């Protein structure tokens, strides 16, 4: 099965232009899902920092080369299985735990992909459960997620 990625710049629904972040899977919008992901990552950073495992957690407003993303900062955790990072909204900067290192520049990006982040997180949760090989190009190592069926209307 061939996988195609389509980037949607904007949508017109009922004659009105709507933002892509308003799109929904029937349960959550993109905005809601990103807000959850961002807060969960900050919570993981705080929990990880205060745990005995002590991987290094850090944040920075600049990439290694000094470039920045508009209205974002970089948050990372250096796990034994590799570094995981996300760009988070600058509006969440005040939520960062006081123990998390604030770096003038982020460490060099190791080229990790979204699948690498998922693999590294899974390996951190339960070491030894993830195969070390990478999936074939264009294939995800994670099962395709489908939403549960909608409740039937009366």
Image: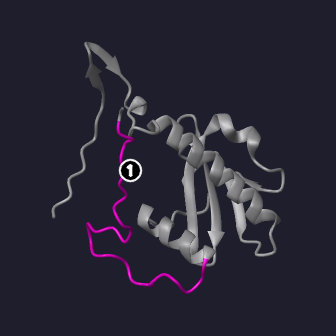
Q: Which residues are magenta?
A: 126-152
Magenta residue check for 132: yes
Looking at the image, the residue that sits furthest to the top is: 15
Q: Residue furthest left?
A: 1
* Quarter of the image that includes the N terminus: bottom left
Q: Residue at x 63, y 54 (%)?
A: 41
Q: Residue at x 26, y 66 (%)?
A: 138
Which element type, helix, strand or loop, lies under badge 1?
Answer: loop
Q: Residue at x 72, y 71 (%)?
A: 55
Is 144 placed left or right of 119 in the picture? left
Q: Tell me where residue 82 appears, x and y as whole percent.
A: 56, 73
**Relative height, residue 65 to residue 16 (above, below):** below
* Main secondary structure along the magenta-highlighted residues: loop
Q: Nearer the viewer, residue 79 or 140?
A: 140
Q: Quadrant of residue 13?
A: top left
Magenta-drawn stretch contains 39: no
User: 143 and 118: which one is in front?
Assistant: 143
Q: Quadrant of residue 107?
A: bottom right
Q: Residues within 10 Å of mark 1 (few under 14, many from 20)?
A: few
Q: Is residue 27 left or right of residue 68?
A: left
What percent of the width, then of the height, locates residue 2? Answer: 16, 61
Percent position of residue 58, x then y? 70, 58
Q: Position of residue 121 (x, y in %)?
A: 56, 69
Residue name at image x 35 percent, y 33 percent: 153
The residue lying toward the viewer, choosing from 104 and 33, is 33
Q: Note whether residue 69 is visible.
A: no
Q: Quadrant of the C terminus?
A: top left
**Residue holding disc 1:** 147
For the rendered model, the colour scheme is one colour
């Amino acid at each position: 099965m061939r996988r195609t990625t389509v980037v949607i710049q904007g949508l017109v629904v009922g004659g009105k232009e709507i933002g892509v972040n308003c799109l929904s899977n029937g349960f959550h919008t993109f905005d809601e899902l990103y807000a959850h992901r961002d807060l969960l990552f900050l919570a993981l950073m705080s929990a990880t920092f205060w745990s005995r495992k002590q991987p290094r957690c850090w944040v920075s407003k600049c990439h290694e080369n000094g470039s920045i993303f508009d209205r974002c900062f970089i948050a990372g955790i250096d796990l034994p299985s590799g570094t995981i990072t996300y760009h988070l909204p600058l509006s969440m900067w005040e939520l960062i735990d006081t123990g998390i290192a604030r770096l003038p520049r982020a460490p060099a990006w190791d080229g990790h992909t979204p699948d690498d982040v998922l693999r590294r997180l899974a390996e951190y949760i339960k070491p030894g459960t993830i195969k070390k090989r990478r999936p074939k190009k264009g294939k995800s190592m994670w099962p395709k997620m489908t939403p549960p069926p909608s409740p039937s209307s009366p």
